[in-house]
Amino acid sequence: MQASRARLFKEYKEVQREKVADPDIQLVCDDSNIFKWTALIKGPSETPFEGGIFQLAFAVPEQYPLQPPQVRFLTKIFHPNVHFKTGEICLDILKNAWSPAWTLQSVCRAIIALMAHPEPDSPLNCDSGNLLRAGDIKGYHSMARMYTRLAAMPKKG
Amino acid sequence: MASHLSRMGVPQEERPTILEKLFHVVQAAVPGGHIFVLIADVTVRLLGSFNDHGNIAHPLRESSIIKIHVNKLCFKTYEIRDIDYHIISSTDTVASESLETYRVKFIPATRSSIEGLQRVRLDSLEEPTIKQNLSCSICMNEFAQGGVDQLITHLPCSHRYHVVCIIRWLETSHVCPLCRYPLPSVEDGEPSNS
Ligand SMILES: [Zn+2]
Ligand SMILES: [Zn+2]
């Protein structure tokens, strides 16, 4: 518990310093609970998520960094590796490939990379995975784009 | 459009609602673009017969796609099987409940490999080593910032950590946090309590 607090505080200070360095990630710690964080990430360019701002919720366990943080999308996203309803993310580094050398900031970067490089063979969103596996890139792109417009972009008017 | 709905077996009384929703979407959509219609509320026993991907290994998991051309707008109707939705809604609550207790199961390193780690005081390390490997990746603290008596160790891959930090990790998982170099693990056959 003490170790996780100290480490999170360290990351907090690091984030304050790096803020300018990574304009695609805005990581914020909850005012009253250092184990709760949220992040705003920019959808990577040349993907259907471009132009969207996606919100992530982090729940950091007391055993952190021996155990990975639990991360999910709060913003609706159509992506093979994200559960369409719960926002749960299927990403190896959040599971068995976790290492304490990862930070909340670098996890955000890994999620941005996943957005650009979906893994249709381990789908949490079968509809999205099936489109990609069937080679319907255009269909996947259009669906993902539609949800980016609907959920991750500021409403017009 | 109505005839497609009837062909899909959508009950008469449900059709106006669906058409109304569709109309809503069409109005907001970019002219000439693709419109995807997800009919999620409809029960879907009928879907099998429209399945385009019958040859795929898991035909049950495939959602079927019907292409409907209305003038120049291309409608693709993605139907999501009712079964999928039931599964999703029933596991939903379970997922959020288990969230708090969820732990990844790693494979710890053996007791003997942990005890066999070389332990050296910071001040007995040569200066360049500390400069090269500035901080411990587990606690993120710089070695140079701690006391000279702090114990440092290196794994066979030569990555350095605080002894207290790496022991906590190796008791959790047997791989180096930085390069995943594997130490002997309790699943390699060696007893964990030697
Ligand atoms: Zn350390
Ligand atoms: Zn290593």
Image: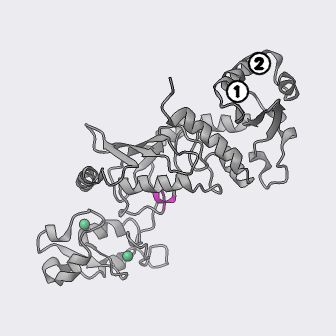
Side of B19 relative to A69 (left or right): right
Residue that numbered label 2 is attached to? B14
Residue that numbered label 1 is attached to? B41
Instruction: Look at the image and tell me in which quarter the N terminus of chain B lies.
Output: top right
Q: Amino acid at mark 2?
A: Glu
Give the residues in magenta: A92-96
Q: Earlier in the sequence, mark 2 or mark 1?
A: 2
Q: Position of residue A151 (x, y in %)?
A: 53, 34
Residue at left 74%, top 46%?
B61
Residue B160 shows in this picture: yes
Dot 1 crowding, Cα within 10 Å, few <14, some 14–19, many 20+: few
State the predominant SS element of the stretch in magenta: helix
Q: Secondary structure at mark 1?
A: loop
Q: Specify the quadrant of the image occupied by residue B193.
A: bottom left
Q: Tags 2 and 1 in contact by the CB under 8 Å rule?
A: yes
Residue A93 lies in the magenta-colored region: yes
